[in-house]
């Protein structure tokens, strides 16, 4: 297999990828000569990484790292044993775990079309879609964007009528109506403030339909 082959197309669900949690790839030194494999299967050998070489860690799995490095045949990406590298500091690992937990939480919010403080603008767009209005300013803290969304709710509309037997009946139809707007303040690409504004509206009208009197 060529040295420039990459396992980038293979994404494992139980692996923490640095780009997913928005953490810069780690630079770690290899402690002992170790095999580099295309996948986590040890039979898919690409080559060997020599001791003392610094590799770029792109993902962290159980007992293995997904890395970018150079081997005898050229640039390559693949998997090596995690114990073949120096251990990341406790501070780095604490930051990675915190980012991973936050990413999982944000994915759950996106599935419910909700937003939260510290979400990225990309996550807000994935959750709520394109904003109806964007205002951009520069403040002391950096770049600020104010995203505005019209908020909607399905409101009931009632129809009251007499049936052919002279009894009063009522039906209800729910119609999507604008009820206010949501304002999201983003500073330097992260959500800083969320405000919901709901307009006071009169209760929905009730339509009464009385059938015409039939004279026989």
Image (cartoon, grey):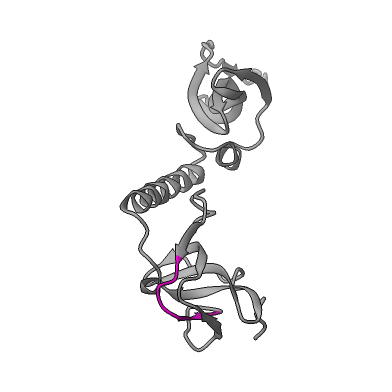
Considering the image in quadrants, where does the N terminus appear?
bottom right
Rendered view: 45 above or below 207: below
**Quadrant of the rendered image containing residue 174:** top right
| Apparent side of residue 120 relative to residue 90 in the rendered image (left or right) | right
Between residues 213 and 22, which one lies in front from this camera angle? 22
How many labels were placed on the picture? 0
User: Can residue 181 be seen here?
Assistant: yes
Residue at the left extreme, as displayed: 90
Specify whether residue 124 is painted magenta.
no
**Quadrant of the rendered image containing residue 44:** bottom right
Residue at the front extreme, as displayed: 52
User: Can residue 16 be seen here?
Assistant: no
Where is residue 8? Give x, y as percent.
Answer: 60, 68
Find the magenta span and give its range: 29-37
Q: Residue drawn at (39%, 71%), measured in percent from left and top? A: 82
Q: Residue drawn at (55%, 23%), measured in percent from left and top? A: 185
Where is residue 148? Give x, y as percent.
Answer: 61, 23
Q: Residue drawn at (51%, 56%), measured in percent from left and top? A: 25
Rendered view: 58 above or below 118: below
Where is residue 48? Give x, y as percent.
Answer: 52, 82
Rendered view: 139 above or below 96: above
Where is residue 164? Give x, y as percent.
Answer: 57, 29
Considering the image in quadrants, where does the C terminus appear?
top right
Between residues 3 and 165, which one lies in front from this camera angle? 3
């Amino acid at each position: 297999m060529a040295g420039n082959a990459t396992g980038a197309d293979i994404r494992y669900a139980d692996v923490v990828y640095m780009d997913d949690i928005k953490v810069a790839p780690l630079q770690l030194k290899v402690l002992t000569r170790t095999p580099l494999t295309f996948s986590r299967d040890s039979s898919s050998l690409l080559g060997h990484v020599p001791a003392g070489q610094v590799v770029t860690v792109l993902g962290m799995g159980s007992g293995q790292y997904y890395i970018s490095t150079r081997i005898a045949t050229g640039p390559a990406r693949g998997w090596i044993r995690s114990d073949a590298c120096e251990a990341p500091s406790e501070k780095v690992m604490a930051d990675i775990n915190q980012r991973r937990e936050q990413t999982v939480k944000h994915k759950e919010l996106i599935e419910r079309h909700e937003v939260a403080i510290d979400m990225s603008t990309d996550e807000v767009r994935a959750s709520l879609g394109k904003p109806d209005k964007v205002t951009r300013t520069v403040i002391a803290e950096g770049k600020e964007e104010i995203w505005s969304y019209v908020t909607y709710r399905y409101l009931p509309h009632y129809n009251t009528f007499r049936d052919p037997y002279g009894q009063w009946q009522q039906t209800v139809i729910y119609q999507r109506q604008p009820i206010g707007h949501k304002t999201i303040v983003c500073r330097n690409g992260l959500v800083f403030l969320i405000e919901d504004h709901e307009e006071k509206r009169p209760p929905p009208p009730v339509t009464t339909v009385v059938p015409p009197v039939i004279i026989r």
